[in-house]
C-alpha cells in the first residue's frame, strides 16, 4: 500500500492528471489535498526504498490467499488481481486473458469500466453477468462516472499501479459461461515496446494473452498532426507486440479508435479505413479486425462495446494453447507467479 | 429436542430484517404459521420485546450494531421435524462492514457456515439506485446546480445492487455445501405497485438478477415480496387498520410471480422445507 494524494474538491483534476485546481505546485501543498491509502494495490519499489520490502511481501502473501474461496476471514473482490493472483485463477478455471493496450489516455480503463457497467443496466448483448472475483474493483473504476460521485461530469481516474493488474468478469449466455481476465495496465507500461524492446520479460502479459485490443485515442483524430502521430505510435506498438516473444500469432487482435464520439460521423468511415490499412501491414503476423469504440460518449449509447465483448468471448472458443515462452515444465501457475515475484523484486 | 435449524438473515442496514422476524414470531405464537411453535421452554424475551412495538403500531427499532440477539425458538417444521430455530438478528451495519472492510466477523462467519440457508433482505421502498452521470444529466430535476460545491467521491460508494451481489458472492463462498439456499426478501413490498418480486428485481437490481439466474448450479434461490407491517405506520388508512386488524392479519407475502404465500415462506425456503 502506498499513500495517494486526493482532493476534497470534486471538480479538481488531481486524480485525473495530477494538476491542482488552485494551480498550486506541488499539489500536496494545497489545503484541499490530503494523502490517503491508494485504492489500487501498488507494488512499492524496494530498490528505491528498502524499508518497503516487508510491505511488498505482505501484499504478495495477501494476494495469494485472496483468490476464489475465502481463506480465514478475509474477503476478496475489492482489488484488481496481481499477476500472481491471476495465475491462481487460471489454475482453477479456464479464462480468456485480454491485453488492453494503448498509450496513456487512450481510454483503456474507461473501456473496462463501461464494458462492465453495461451489466448494471441489464443483460448485455445476449450475455448475463455471472460473477466477478474483482467486483468492487470494477465498480470502483466506474465510481467517478456515477451520480453518487458528486461530480458534474464523468471522469476516469488514471491507472496508477506500476505493475499490470487484471480484472475478472464472468459472463454467461444460456449454459455457456466465459471468464475474462482483462488487463488494467497504465499506458507508460507499453513505452518500452513502443521504443523497440521485445515484449518478452518487459510485457509477459503479451505472450499469455488470448486476445488483444490496441486503442488509439479518437481525441487525436480531428488534428491531422496528432492523428498521424497516433497512427505511427499504434504501428510501432503493434509491431512491437507482434514480434517473436510477443502476442501469439493465432490470437485475435482488435484495433480501435477509442472515444469515437469525438470523431465526426462523416469522418468515421475514413477513420476505419486508416485502421484497416494499418491492419493490413500486420496481416501476415496476426488476425486484426478494426472498430470504433466510444465507451462513454457524451450523448447517446456506447459505440462498439458489443463488438468488443464478442471479440473477447469468441477468443474462448479457440483451442487452449500453451504460452510459447513458458519456462521449461512450468505450469501456468508457476509462470505467472514467477512474473509476479519478479515484479516485486 | 433434537435438531437445531440455523438460518442467516443478511441485508444492508434498514432492510426490514427485524420487522420480518417479529411478523414471523407473531404468526408462530398465534398458531397461524406452517412453521409451528414447539414447546415454551425457550428464550423469548428478545422477540417479546420487539413484538410489543408491532402490537403498539410503531416501527421496530433498528438493531444496534454489536447486538448478538437472536430469535431462538422451539419449532416444528411442516415436514414434522422438531428442533430449535436459531436466527441471529445482526445489525445491517455488520453486513455493510463485510462489504466495505472485506473481513468476516468471526462469529458471523461461524453462524453463516452453520446455516441451512440464507434470507437476504432488500428494502423495496428505500432501495437506492446510482445512475451514471449522463443519465442524471437527462433528468433536469436531478441534475446538480452547475458550479455548486460537490463532495469528493466517496471511496466506498458502490451501487446497492453491486453491494448485494458482492454480499451474495461472499455468502456463497462461505458455505461448505453447494448449492446454497437463498430466499431474497423484498421488504416493504406494499410500497411497490404493478410489479411482482421477480419483475422488481429485474427492473431495479438487474446485476443481481443476472447473477442469480446465471448461478443456478450454486444458488437455489426463491424471490419473495413481504409486507411485515401491512403498510407504513403513520399513514392515515394504516392508523385505522391498526385499530381494526391484528398484526398477524395485516402481514402478507407474495412469491416471485406475485402469488400469495405465507409470511413464513421465505424462512421455510431457507430451511429447505419447501
Image (cartoon, grey):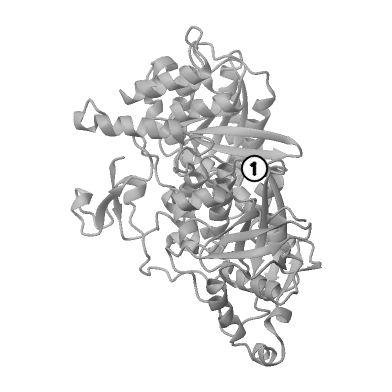
Left or right placement of residue A32 versus residue B260 in this view = left
- Is residue B189 among what the camera can see? no
Residue placed at 65% from the left, 47% from the top?
B211
Closer to the camera in the image, B266 or A96: B266
Side of B219 relative to B50 (left or right): right
Residue A343, percent from left and from top: 35, 24
User: Circle 1 marks a residue in which chain?
Assistant: A
Q: Quadrant of the N terminus of chain A?
A: top left
Please name the residue that numbered disc 1 is placed on. A130
Q: Where is residue A169? Give x, y as percent.
A: 58, 39
Q: Residue at x 77, y 66 (%)?
A: B34
Quadrant occupied by the C terminus of chain A: top left
Q: Which is more toward the observer, B260 or A13? A: B260
Asked if A241 appears above or below B236 in the picture, the reply is above
Packing grade of label 1 (10 A; few <14, some 14-19, many >=20) is many
Q: Relative to B64, is A186 above or below?
A: above
Amino acid at each position: 500500500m502506498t499513500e495517494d494524494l486526493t482532493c476534497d474538491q470534486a471538480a479538481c483534476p488531481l486524480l485525473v492528471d495530477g494538476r491542482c485546481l488552485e494551480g498550486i505546485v506541488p499539489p500536496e501543498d494545497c489545503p484541499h489535498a490530503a494523502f490517503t491509502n491508494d485504492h489500487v494495490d501498488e507494488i512499492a519499489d524496494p530498490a528505491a526504498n528498502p524499508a518497503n520490502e516487508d510491505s511488498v511481501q505482505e501484499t504478495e502473501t495477501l494476494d495469494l490467499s485472496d483468490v476464489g474461496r475465502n481463506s480465514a476471514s478475509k474477503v476478496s473482490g475489492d482489488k484488481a488481481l496481481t499477476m500472481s493472483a491471476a495465475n491462481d485463477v487460471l489454475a482453477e478455471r479456464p479464462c480468456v486473458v485480454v491485453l488492453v493496450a494503448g498509450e496513456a489516455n487512450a481510454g483503456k480503463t474507461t473501456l473496462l469500466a463501461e464494458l462492465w457497467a453495461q451489466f448494471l443496466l441489464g443483460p448485455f448483448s445476449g450475455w448475463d453477468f455471472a460473477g466477478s472475483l474483482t467486483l468492487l474493483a470494477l465498480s470502483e473504476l466506474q465510481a467517478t462516472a456515477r451520480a453518487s460521485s458528486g461530480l458534474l461530469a464523468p471522469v476516469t481516474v488514471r491507472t496508477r499501479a506500476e505493475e499490470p493488474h487484471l480484472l475478472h468478469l464472468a459472463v454467461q449466455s444460456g449454459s455457456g459461461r466465459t471468464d475474462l481476465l482483462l488487463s488494467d495496465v497504465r499506458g507508460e507500461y507499453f513505452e518500452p515496446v513502443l521504443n523497440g524492446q521485445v515484449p518478452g520479460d518487459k510485457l509477459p502479459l503479451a505472450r499469455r494473452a488470448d486476445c488483444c485490443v490496441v486503442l488509439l485515442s479518437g481525441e487525436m483524430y480531428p488534428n491531422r498532426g496528432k492523428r498521424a502521430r497516433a497512427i505511427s505510435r499504434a504501428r510501432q506498438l503493434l509491431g512491437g507486440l507482434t514480434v517473436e516473444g510477443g502476442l501469439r500469432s493465432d490470437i485475435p487482435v482488435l484495433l480501435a479508435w477509442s472515444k469515437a464520439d469525438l470523431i465526426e460521423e462523416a469522418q468515421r468511415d475514413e477513420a476505419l479505413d486508416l485502421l484497416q490499412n494499418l491492419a493490413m501491414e500486420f496481416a501476415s503476423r496476426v488476425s486484426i479486425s478494426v472498430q470504433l469504440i466510444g465507451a462513454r460518449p457524451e450523448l447517446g449509447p456506447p459505440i462498439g462495446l458489443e463488438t468488443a465483448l464478442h471479440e473477447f468471448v469468441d477468443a474462448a472458443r479457440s483451442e487452449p494453447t500453451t504460452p510459447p515462452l513458458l519456462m521449461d515444465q512450468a505450469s501456468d501457475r508457476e509462470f505467472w507467479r514467477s512474473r509476479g515475484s519478479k515484479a516485486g523484486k | 429436542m433434537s435438531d437445531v435449524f440455523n438460518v442467516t438473515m443478511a441485508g444492508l442496514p434498514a432492510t426490514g430484517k427485524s420487522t420480518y422476524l417479529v411478523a414471523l414470531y407473531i404468526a408462530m405464537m398465534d398458531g397461524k404459521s406452517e412453521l409451528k411453535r414447539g414447546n415454551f421452554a425457550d428464550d423469548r424475551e428478545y422477540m417479546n420485546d420487539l413484538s410489543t412495538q408491532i402490537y403498539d403500531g410503531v416501527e421496530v427499532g433498528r438493531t444496534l450494531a454489536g447486538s448478538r440477539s437472536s430469535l431462538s425458538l422451539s419449532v416444528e417444521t411442516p415436514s414434522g421435524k422438531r428442533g430449535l430455530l436459531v436466527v441471529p438478528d445482526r445489525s445491517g451495519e455488520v453486513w455493510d462492514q463485510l462489504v466495505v472492510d472485506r473481513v468476516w466477523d468471526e462469529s458471523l462467519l461461524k453462524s453463516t457456515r452453520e446455516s441451512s440457508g440464507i434470507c437476504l433482505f432488500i428494502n423495496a421502498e428505500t432501495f437506492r439506485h446510482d445512475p451514471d452521470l449522463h443519465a442524471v444529466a437527462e433528468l433536469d430535476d436531478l441534475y446538480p446546480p452547475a458550479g455548486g460545491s460537490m463532495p469528493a467521491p466517496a471511496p466506498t460508494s458502490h451501487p446497492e445492487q453491486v453491494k448485494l451481489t458482492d454480499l451474495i458472492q461472499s455468502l456463497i463462498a462461505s458455505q461448505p455445501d453447494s448449492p446454497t439456499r437463498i430466499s431474497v426478501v423484498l421488504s416493504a413490498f406494499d410500497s411497490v405497485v404493478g410489479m411482482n418480486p421477480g419483475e422488481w428485481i429485474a427492473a431495479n437490481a438487474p446485476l443481481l438478477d443476472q447473477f442469480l439466474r446465471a448461478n443456478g448450479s450454486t444458488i437455489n434461490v426463491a424471490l419473495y415480496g413481504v409486507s411485515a407491517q401491512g403498510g407504513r405506520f403513520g399513514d392515515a388508512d394504516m392508523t385505522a387498520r391498526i385499530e381494526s386488524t391484528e398484526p398477524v392479519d395485516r402481514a402478507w407475502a407474495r412469491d416471485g410471480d406475485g402469488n400469495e404465500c405465507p409470511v413464513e415462506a421465505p424462512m421455510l425456503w431457507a430451511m429447505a422445507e419447501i
